[in-house]
Image (tube, rainbow, N blue to C red):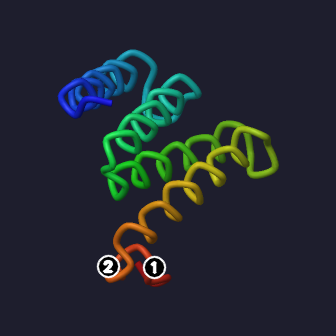
């Protein structure tokens, strides 16, 4: 995919996220969807650290809204793991995401 198009997608996702927070609030299922879409966009743009941050926020909201034992929360764990594995593969020398104390 073309990088310019992917960068534009990330910018638009960030705008949608800000609107979602404004319209629905921070801890709502609608805002979790927006965070998740941003995470997916940044993953495609190969910005894995940003993608992980968005997916972590998605997980936090989904755990609050749906509970830990919900399929949507499980999907968020899966998304984090998927991005994390790609990140570690591409940047094995970067320990900031592998440090459990972080």
Q: Residue at x 64, y 54 (%)?
A: 77
Q: Which residue is mark 2?
A: 94
Q: Count neighbours of disc 1 (C-alpha within 10 A) and say few if under 14, some if 14 to 19, many if 20 or more.
A: few
Q: Nearer the viewer, mark 2 or mark 1?
A: 2
Label 2 to label 1, Cα distance in Å? 8 Å
Residue 30 point in image, percent of width and height: 53, 22
Q: Residue at x 43, y 41 (%)?
A: 39
Q: Quarter of the image holding residue 64?
A: top right
- Does 15 sit left or right of 76 as displayed? left
At numbered mark 1, what does the secondary structure look like: helix, strand or loop? loop
Outermost residue toward the top?
A: 23
Q: Nearer the viewer, residue 87 or 74?
A: 87
Q: Nearer the viewer, residue 54 or 67?
A: 54
Q: Which residue is mark 1?
A: 98
Q: Residue at x 33, y 49 (%)?
A: 46
Residue 28 point in image, percent of width and height: 54, 29
Q: Are marks 2 and 1 in contact (CB under 8 Å)?
A: yes
At numbered mark 2, what does the secondary structure look like: helix, strand or loop? loop
Residue 31 point in image, percent of width and height: 48, 28
């Amino acid at each position: 995919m073309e990088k310019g198009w992917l960068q534009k997608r990330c910018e638009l996702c960030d705008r949608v996220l800000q609107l979602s927070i404004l319209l629905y609030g921070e801890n709502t299922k609608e805002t979790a969807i927006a965070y998740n879409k941003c995470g997916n966009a940044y993953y495609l743009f190969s910005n894995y650290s940003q993608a992980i941050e968005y997916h972590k926020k998605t997980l936090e909201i989904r755990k609050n809204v749906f509970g830990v034992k919900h399929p949507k929360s499980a999907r968020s764990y899966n998304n984090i793991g998927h991005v994390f594995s790609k990140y570690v593969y591409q940047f094995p020398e970067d320990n900031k995401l592998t440090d459990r104390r972080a």
